[in-house]
Amino acid sequence: MGWFVNLATFLVNEILSEPAYLIGIITAVGLIAMKKSTGQIVGGAIKATLGFLLIGAGAGLVTASLDPLGTMIQGVTGAHGVIPTNEAIVGIAQDQFGSRVAWLMILGFVVSLLLARFTPLRYVFLTGHHMLFMATLLTVVLANGGRSTVAVVAVGGVLLGIMLVAMPAFAHPWTKRVTGSDTVAIGHFGTAGYIVAGATGRVVGKRSRSTEEMKLPEGLRFLRDSMVATALSMLLIYLVMAVLLLVKEGQKTAFKAFATGTGTVATGTGNYLMQSVMQGLQFGIAVAVILFGVRTILGELVPAFQGIAQKVVPGALPALDAPIVFPYAQNAVLIGFISSFTGGLIGLALLTWIFDPAFGLALVLPGLVPHFFTGGAAGVYGNATGGRRGAVVGAFLNGLLITFLPALLLKVLGAFGDQNTTFGDADFGWFGALIGNAGKAGGAAGLVIIVLLGLAVLGGAILVQKRVVDTGWDPGAARDALMPRENVATPAEAGATTAAYAKIPPPA
C-alpha cells in the first residue's frame, strides 16, 4: 500500500494541486474528444498551460508588490493579529494531515465529476489550488473531532465534491450577467462575496452607470488605459502610506519597509519615495500579466471544452479562477480592491472595539492579496448589476465578509486556530464554520448532521440551477429597464443563451 499512497500523494501535490497542469490536461482531453490533430492537441494544451502560468506569475508579482504596503499599513495603524493566508495554513496542515488531504482531494474530484455527469449541475471545477485548500480545510475541521481517517476522507470527499459543483451553480446567474454568455463559470471559493456583491448591486445601483463608462477630462484620457490607471492609483496609495509611515515611525523604521524579498533598505528619503513609486508601477505590470494570461487560457480552454461537453459530461461548463472575470470590467477590479480593503479596515476596527471584547473573536488584518483578488472580482459582479455604486458597495461588503468569516472559522480549527494565520476567502469561512460547529455534536450524530448539511447545499444548488439558471433569469434586468435604451444590447448582440442587457464586452 505504500506505493499506492505515494502515487496518490504525487498526483495531488505535483499535478492536481497545480492548476496549470490540470488545465493543460483538461484542454488536451477536450481536443482529443474533438478529434483534433496531434499538433493541435499538443499546442492547445501547452498554450492553455502557459496561460495559467501567466496568471500565476502575475499573482506572484502582485504578492511581491503588496508585501511592503502591508508592512507600511501595520506600521501606520499599529495593528497586529491574524493574517488570513491560504497557502500558509495549508503548508502548516500538510505536515500532520498530508496523506488524508491527498485521498480526500482525489475522492472529492471524482465525486464532483459524478455529480456533474448525473445531476443538473454541469460544472467542472478547474481551480486546482482551491480544491487543495478546501480539501485541507475539511480535513482539519473533521479531524479536529478525533474522527478516523476513513470517516474524514469519506465524508470530506463527499462534501468537497458537492462544493465543487454547487458554488459555481449558486453564482452562475451573476456570472452570466458579467460575461454575457453561458460558456464559462466561476470556480473560486470566494463565491459568497461575489453573490453578495451582485445582489447588492441590484439594490443600490439601479440607475448607476458602469465603471467602464467613466468619462474623464481630455487631459486625463490616458487613464482610460486600465494598466495605466491601476499603476497610477497604486502609486498614489504607496506614496501616501510611505509618507505617513515616515512621519510616524521615523527614517530608521520606514526605510526598512522595502527590505522584503529582493528589496533593499532605502538609502535616503528620496530613494525611499522612489521605491514607493516603483512598487506602484510593478503592481500595474502584475495586473497586466494576469489579464493577458486570462485571455490566453480562454482562447484555448473554452473551445476545447466543447469536446468534454459532448463526450464526457454533456453540457459541462469550465469553472475557473476569479481573475477570469477581470477583463470584463477592468476599472471595477481596482475600485473593488480599494472598496474591499476599506471594508477590511472597518471590519478590523469593529473587531477591535466590539466583537473581540464581546465575543473573543480574533483580530483579522486585511490581507492585501485576498482583498485584491476577491475584492476585484466582487467589484466586477457588483458593477454588472449596479454600476459604480454596485461595485463600491458590493466589494465593501465582500471586505467585511472576508474579515468576519475567518474570525468565526478560527473557533473550529482547534490547535490550528493558534497559528496566527487561517483560510482567507469567504466560502472557506462560512462552510468551515458551519461544518465545524455541526461536528461538535460528536460521534455518529455529528457526522450525520454534517452529511445532511452537505446534502442541503447540494439540494439548494440543484434548485437554483433548475429554477433560476435554466430559466434564464437575469439579475440585472430591472436596472436595464431604467437605463437609457442605447445602452441595452439587442437579443442578437447578447447571444441566444442570455437575456438582453447592457453587457460589458471583454477585450478584443
Image (tube, grey):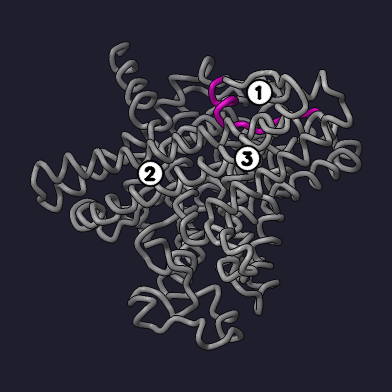
- Say which residue appears at 44% left-offset and 52% top-offset: 324
Q: Which residue is mark 2?
A: 126
Q: Is residue 8 left or right of residue 239?
A: left
Q: Which residue is mark 3?
A: 280
- Say which residue appears at 52% left-offset and 61% top-offset: 329
Distance from disc 1 to disc 3, alpha carbons, whole Å, reads 35 Å
Q: Which residue is mark 1?
A: 416
> Which SS class for mark 2?
loop
User: Does the magenta-highlighted stretch encompass residue 423?
Assistant: no
Between 312 and 251, which is closer to the camera in this rendering?
A: 251
Q: Amino acid at mark 1?
A: Phe
Between 244 and 403, which is closer to the camera in this rendering?
A: 244
Q: Is residue 197 above or below residue 127?
A: below
Residue 8 x %, y %: 33, 23
Between 48 and 455, which is closer to the camera in this rendering?
A: 48
Q: Amino acid at mark 3?
A: Gly
Which residues are drawn in magenta?
Answer: 80-91
The reply to whether dot 1 and dot 3 touch (C-beta < 8 Å) is no
Residue 226 x %, y %: 53, 55
The reply to whether dot 2 and dot 3 touch (C-beta < 8 Å) is no
Dot 2 surroundings within 10 Å: few (below 14), some, or many (20 or more)? many
Q: Is residue 241 left or right of residue 158?
A: right
